[in-house]
Amino acid sequence: MLRVACLLVLGIVAGACSSGTNASQDAGGDGSMSGDAGDASDANSATDAADAADATSSCPSSGDPAACDDGTGSLGAATACPLSVDGGKVDPTATASYHVRVTGSKFATSGACVYVTPSSCPTTNGDVVQFAGGGGTGLEDGFNEELEKTPYCFRLLDVQWDSDWEDDGMTTGGPVGMGGDMLAASQKPQALITWVYDFERTSTATPLCARGNSGGSSELLYELMHNAGEAQLDHVQIVSATPFARVDEGCDPTSPTEGTNVVCSALPTTTEPEYNAAATLVRTITHDPNCDADAGLGTSERASLRAMSLVPTGFSSMTMQKTSLSVYMCSNAPNATQGQAVDVFGVAADLATTGAGPGLISLTLATPFYACAANASCPPHVVCGADCSTEGYGTTDADKMEILSDMQSSCVMRH
């Protein structure tokens, strides 16, 4: 594929850049010029249409929402996404970075760094876009050293937002007329994923998948449930879902404990849907000074908060046929954000078909997925770990291997 911006690989400029000139990128999409054994096969599988469209990846862009490479990544004159700071690597495995400008009518112009870790294998098996927790201003790169090597062989694109992705940056709309609509803000990751799909994937013959933790899990659930749906991602893997299933409940200090009405059957009965320590962040995101305040919520305020939730009033159940979904959570002393996941995945979802209530998402895939046969209707793959706490799934060797193996077996072409 071709890129407008040149890349810096291992500290060496891979090619000369000038305005309006495309520099050749290796077929693996990692920006290096190494020409490893897998590059030729990857290049042959990329379509001419994708190469032609690549010229439009630079700013300005068209569309609502839209994302584009503004040219200030690792080689920009004013580097927005440095590969290293004070001698330390920002994303230890990354060899290139882009700064993506994101625009749309429902949110203020925003931006994100995308750090690229190429696969070290002869052939790249696919691309995985990774979204960090909280406001997404950190990096979800903890598994990079394994995922880029044999037997996984993935190319990784780690997203680091310039500011909290959940904040729409607007001064009108939202729960109290001052902006702060998270559903509108979710179009930012929608635009970024579309940019990756159009311009930055290894090839059209390899899968595009995604991982997200905590707040990052919500970015991906908004994508699946409200935005582009299953149009682009072949497999989605989320950990510690989800703080935003019901924002109105999360902002209401009188919400009752959930008891046994939870996704993980072993979740403590004292689990609550409130944000607790994260209340300040949620107030900032929603621009609502009363969110989680003792004064409670007014009727219109509550309705507005519900409307921006993953599960707004009247949301219908959905069936995905081209995107598989795996969910990982802790059932031992979890933090409160996980309690709301029941609104998306249903009661005791870790027990699959024996659960007390179905969730809003079901899968009918053309290929087998865990215990789900081809073309059969099944729930997402939900795993609740008893050997972790809060949002720590993946900290033990066994849980880490579960996540790695899931990506290896599930990130396959479904489109």
Image (cartoon, grey):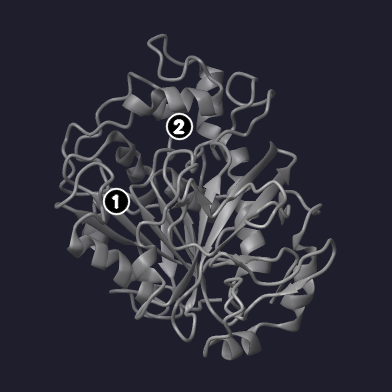
Between 170 and 162, the one nearer to me in the picture: 162
Between 258 and 200, the one nearer to me in the picture: 200
Q: Report whether residue 227 is seen.
A: no
Does label 1 or label 2 sit earlier along the sequence?
A: 2
In this picture, residue 254 sits left or right of residue 301: left
Label 1 belongs to which residue?
A: 357
Identity of the residue drawn at 30% across and 64% down: 403
Q: Comparing marks 1 and 2, which lies closer to the viewer?
A: 2
Within-10-Å neighbours for mark 1: few <14, some 14–19, many 20+: some
Residue 185's mark?
Answer: none
Identity of the residue drawn at 26% across and 43% down: 262
Q: Report whether residue 142 is seen.
A: yes
Identity of the residue drawn at 69% across and 51% down: 72
Between 307 and 102, the one nearer to me in the picture: 102
Horizontal and vertical percent for residue 291? 46, 19
Horizontal and vertical percent for residue 341? 35, 44
Identity of the residue drawn at 47% across and 86% down: 122
Residue 165 position (above or below residue 233)? above
Horizontal and vertical percent for residue 71? 73, 55
In this picture, residue 355 sits left or right of residue 87: left
> What is the quadrant of residue 411 in the picture?
bottom left
Residue 256 position (above or below residue 137)? above
Looking at the image, which residue sits at the far top?
A: 295
Horizontal and vertical percent for residue 255? 32, 24
- Look at the numbered disc 1 and give the secondary structure of its residue: loop
Residue 317 position (above or below residue 47)? above
Within-10-Å neighbours for mark 2: few <14, some 14–19, many 20+: many
Type of the residue with mark 2: Val
Label 2 belongs to which residue?
A: 247
- Look at the numbered disc 2 and give the secondary structure of its residue: helix
